[in-house]
Amino acid sequence: MKRIKQINESKELIFEAYMQLLKEKKEEDITLTEIAETAGVGRMTIYRHFKEKEDILLYKVQQYYEVARLQLQDKKLSLLALMEFRYELIYKSPNIEHFYKTNKLQALFDAFRTIYSSDIMTVLPSSIDAYTAAFIISGMDAITNLWIQNGRVEPPKQMAQLTAQNIEKHLSK
């Protein structure tokens, strides 16, 4: 238990250091050595926890998801609830624009898909095959990508309704 606490503390230190450095300079100018120095950890500590800098941000997004997912357990799971959850999470996620500017949104979407794909499958009709589910999830990613590209102007709840409506239209055909 002590080891898990130490790992989590190290990850938090690394995340906070990275966020601090992102305020001071461009992402491409930040080295892992700088992150380690700012965090007060050894470079090998970073490599033990993260393969690349974007993984530091993905770590925090995954943490937000896990906390928010616990809140979802109290609600009846529905397509709209999952879409609202998805857009709120992305809206609140740190440095989402960084993922967009560095063409790493797909990595973010892949992380989301890994985390909540079983939830998505529970709200889709059981007659949906894996290919159709992949099509639907790719459509969600495309809509989300466009929303981010356009500056996330629409509120998350509106985007959730739009996405859920589009999915339900496809399913009713």
Image (cartoon, rainbow, N blue to C red):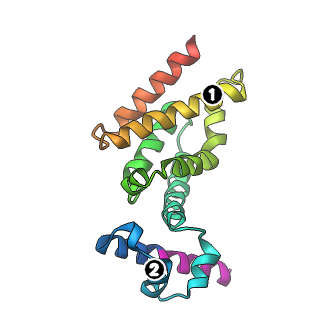
| SS class, disc 1 | loop
Q: CA distance from mark 2 to mark 1?
A: 42 Å
Residue at 57% x, 34% y: name it.
137
Which quarter of the image is occupied by the C terminus? top right
For the question of whether residue 78 can be seen, the reply is: no
Local crowd size for mark 2, using a 10 Å CA cut-off: few (<14), some (14–19), many (≥20): many
In the image as oriented, which residue stretches furthest toward the front?
Answer: 29
Residue type highlighted by circle 1: Leu
Q: Quadrant of residue 136?
A: top right
Residue type highlighted by circle 2: Ile
Q: Quadrant of residue 51?
A: bottom right
Question: Main structural element of the magenta stretch: helix, strand or loop?
Answer: helix
Residue at 52% x, 24% y: name it.
167
Q: Quadrant of residue 154?
A: top left
Local crowd size for mark 1, using a 10 Å CA cut-off: few (<14), some (14–19), many (≥20): some
Residue 153 shown left or right of residue 59 in the figure: left
Return the disc, 2 or 1, that comes first in the chain's sequence: 2
Residue 79: image location, x then y, percent: 53, 31
Residue for badge 1? 124
Instruction: Find out whether residue 3 is within the magenta segment.
Output: yes
Instruction: Find out whether residue 59 is within the magenta segment.
Output: no
Residue 47: image location, x then y, percent: 61, 77
Magenta-highlighted residues: 1-14
Which quarter of the image is occupied by the N terminus? bottom right
| SS class, disc 2 | helix
Residue 52: image location, x then y, percent: 55, 67
Residue for badge 2? 35
* Nearest to the observer: residue 9 or residue 68: 9
Residue 149 shown left or right of residue 56 in the figure: left
Q: Compared to 60, does 162 lie above or below?
A: above
